[in-house]
Amino acid sequence: MSKNNLEQQAYQMIRQKIINCDYPPGMLLSENILLGDIPGSRTPIRSALGRLEQEKLVTILPKKGILVVGLSIRDLQFVYDARSRLEPYAITHYGNTLPESFYMDYYNKFSKLTPEDPITTHYSIDDEFHSSLINATDNPYFIHMYEQVHVQTHRARVLSAQITNVRLNDSQREHIGILLSCLKKDWEQAAELMKNHLSLSQFSVFKELSPSYVTL
């Protein structure tokens, strides 16, 4: 495997562990820990860590280790504020660029979800839908911004008690409502429902987020 491929592999694996909170906020890593978890040598891992530091997911502390950047209530407020502006805008201005079959497909996917389905299935369908709406803008700045904020909201979601059936059921209904409005081509209503969905998601995360992992 080439040097670039090894670096990319290390980057993706470490990043995924941070996003899924296998490496939770505030954890102090070392190169030895990473070498035990990530295939490869120190060189690609160090290169990967440099990229992750630029993304503000880790902080490299000389002679101490690699600190997984924590979550703060202030940052999460900024993140949800960005989403509540970006995603309704995407629906209003670009929702009509996606075919009706796209909305029908996700309407069926959300409708068929059950409490017995793995939480990862719920999250996967949720993430795919939101990402597709942003990708529809074909705006690289919007897409890059969404990728950045999604990392933080997903970390917060994993660490919160949002996995309860009550919130999953509510989120499912909220998505179905958004999709029905899109199928009716009522983009203003769909945008308003999206804004409400994000507000309720934020409330749920903030309510249940473990104080062990967040700061003010």
Image (tube, helix red, strand yellow):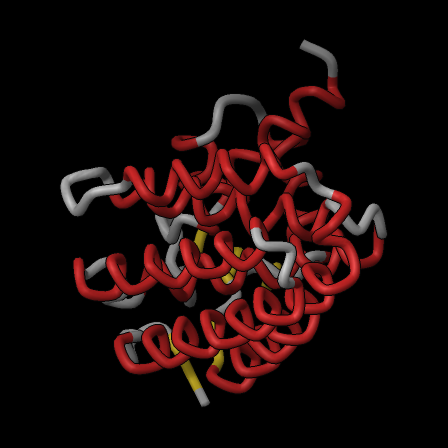
Can the viewer see residue 44? yes
Q: Quadrant for the N terminus, please.
A: top right
**Outermost front residue:** 184
Q: Of 145 and 181, which appears nearest the observer?
A: 181
Q: Residue 155: which quarter of the image?
A: bottom left
Can the viewer see residue 28? no
**Outermost bottom residue:** 216
Q: In this view, does 164 lie to the left or right of 104?
A: left
Q: Residue 33: which quarter of the image?
A: top left
Q: Quadrant for the C terminus, please.
A: bottom left
| x, y percent for residue 181 | 54, 59
Please say if 137 is above or below 93: above
Residue depicted at x 68% and y 29%: 7
Please say if 78 is above or below 2: below
Q: In this view, does 74 lie to the left or right of 133?
A: left
Q: Is residue 61 left or right of residue 85?
A: left
Please say if 118 is above or below 179: above
| x, y percent for residue 175 | 43, 56
Q: Of 57 and 141, which appears nearest the observer?
A: 141
Q: How many marks?
A: 0
| x, y percent for residue 178 | 50, 59
Residue depicted at x 45% and y 57%: 154
Residue depicted at x 48% and y 80%: 72
Residue depicted at x 39% and y 63%: 174
| x, y percent for residue 209 | 31, 75
Q: Is residue 98 left or right of residue 165?
A: right
Q: Of 108 and 207, which appears nearest the observer?
A: 108
